[in-house]
Amino acid sequence: MASILIIDDEDSYYDLCTRYLPEHNYLTPARNFREVMEVLRSHAKSIDLVLLDVHFDIPEAELLPVDKTELIARYGRKRALERLRRSQGLRILDGIRRAYPDLRTIVMTSREDLPLEADAQRLHAEDYTYLHDEEYLDARSLKLLIDGVLAQRREDPEAGEGPFFWGGTPRMQQLRRRLTIIARGRLPIIIQGATGTGKSLVAREYIHPHSGRAGPFVAVDLSTIPTDLMAAHLFGVTKGAYTGATSTREGVLEQADNGTLFLDEIGNLSLELQKSLLLLLQDGRYRAVGSVKEKVADIKLVVATNENLASLVRAGRFREDLYMRLNPATAVTLPGLAQRRDDFMQLLTFFIRRVADEAYNRDLLLRYAQQRSLQISEGEAVPVTIGRSVPAQVNPGRIHLLLHPNSFNQLREFSWPGNFRQFEMTLSNILTFTLVELVERAEQIEPEAIGQNVRADVVPIPAKVVIELLRPMAELHRDTESDEEEGQDPRRVQVEVVEGSTLNAVSCAVERQYLETLYIRLGGELSALAEVLLGDATAGRKVQIRMNQLGIKLRSLKRRRAGGL
Ligand SMILES: Nc1ncnc2c1ncn2[C@@H]1O[C@H](COP(=O)(O)OP(=O)(O)OP(=O)(O)O)[C@@H](O)[C@H]1O
Ligand SMILES: [Mg+2]
């Protein structure tokens, strides 16, 4: 249920809404700008949405603007008033925006001769619509609009809800709508996208909650399970099925019953198991390893891959019949960060808030706030904003991070091969390095001297911090490209001594080559790598994540391995 304010000179929209959309709470409609401001003064915080008419047939004294002399001089009284009545809603919206820039508004009219689009955009209305004076149709289209705007609000980063950030671009909104629809259905879902684009996150935090299924969400990363254990892991095993099967164990299929089973990196499934999965999708039945008894599983299957499944099919590595069963017509591809430049500012805001809440950064922010006597209470998330300019008003309750326009451009134009994962880490580093400097310097000087900073609520991010964090990653990326050449001793790592290269860049380059070489030598088994590096064969995922962060492309390494390096 949402709280909705209707601004209209007549009762028709109010009647329509209360009759057909009774699930919401409607305030008494406001008839003119003065009444609007009165309601907003006391209720703005609790109002979720405003529905605003455009044409207002109201007395001259109630019309905006208050001073009409110029218009009357230009058009004559009659025509001037007619013009004002025709577009009064837009003038009201303009007035609202000055005091309440964030109030969500849908502009609507039943007069098709009023061009709305440009004005609605200029005044930042969330949406606009032409109604048709046909009760049922109007109610339906209003319902769709209202639901759409309210859903956006729920996922708005400002509201702090929903861990998956969609953003407001039509492309992402369309993707979200599509996922909402296919999440509910019975059919499997394929999610594609490069590393770090949020495939796992969207499966867990969006698809499963929208599936309406009561059972659990169970995720299995097939790239980290040794091939010979995969069948038992998925389907379960009965005691004595093979040497070592000392007890009967249930598989993930059983655990995910009535829920969602997420098979990550589906390209790693052996051809044999692909067959078993196909049978399961065909009639919902399967057998545990070593068992003759059939079991039934009611699961919603979601699979993810950063390879292209269709090309795996063409290469003979993935069964075509299974591919067709996975419902490829609705496959969803999540865009990488480099394709999200049009809503980069919102992404920046979303992720900077997220990293500001990491323990270390939070602690730094709180120390910074204490040193400068900013009113931020401990124990709460420190409210941060980020932007390219200094906000006009001091807001002692929050910290504004000031990004130099050049830094903003560098961040936006960067190629981000590790996508959101890499972005989040970089922002976390930027915040840490910026704050550590300020906090530690402040501890070395007289406390009174600190207060002299006029805008304690504004923290400038040094351009140097951004450059130094991006440089090693840019170099890394360049290396990956040129490194396809052969002729090196595969057991040696090589570092080029370049003046101006930071130590961080050097150690990343070494680490990357070391991991690549080891990966190839250990036959491409992440578990073996994890055993060698961390002493824990089950930590393959950790190694994989680190390799991703370093920009290592496992696919091209696999090719090199196949090439006999
Ligand atoms: N749209 C998004 N909104 C919020 N966080 C995101 C989004 N996309 C990715 N992330 C964050 O980026 C990181 C990587 O996401 P995730 O693990 O889901 O990616 P992935 O596509 O599954 O990567 P991989 O192919 O390497 O498994 C996570 O920390 C996740 O929270
Ligand atoms: Mg993943």
Image: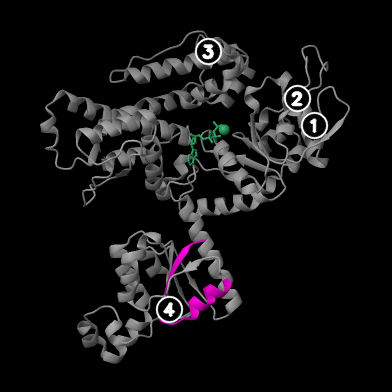
Q: Which residue is mark 2?
A: 231
Q: Residue beneath label 3, please? A: 534
Label 2 close to label 1 by CB (< 8 Å): yes
User: What is the three-letter code of the residue carrying label 3?
Assistant: Leu
* Residue on which the image places disc 4: 114
Residue 29 lies in magenta, yes or no?
Answer: no
Percent x, y for residue 98? 28, 64
Q: Amino acid at mark 2?
A: Ala
Type of the residue with mark 1: Ser
Is disc 1 surrounded by few (<14), some (14 to 19) or many (20+) residues within 10 Å?
Answer: some
Q: Is residue 283 above or below residue 430?
A: below
Magenta span: 1-20
Q: Is residue 169 visible?
A: no
For discs 1 and 3, the disc positioned in front in the rendered view: 3
Pointer 2: residues within 10 angstroms few (<14), some, or many (20+)? many
Instruction: For marks 2 and 4, give the CA distance.
Output: 64 Å
Q: Nearer the viewer, mark 3 or mark 4?
A: 3
Task: Identify the disc placed on residue 518.
Answer: none
Assess whether mark 4 and mark 2 are in contact (beta carbons under 8 angstroms). Answer: no
Q: Please tell me whether mark 2 sits on a helix, a strand or a loop.
A: helix
* Real-space CA distance between mark 3 and mark 2, rounded to the nearest whole angstrom: 26 Å
Badge 1 element? helix
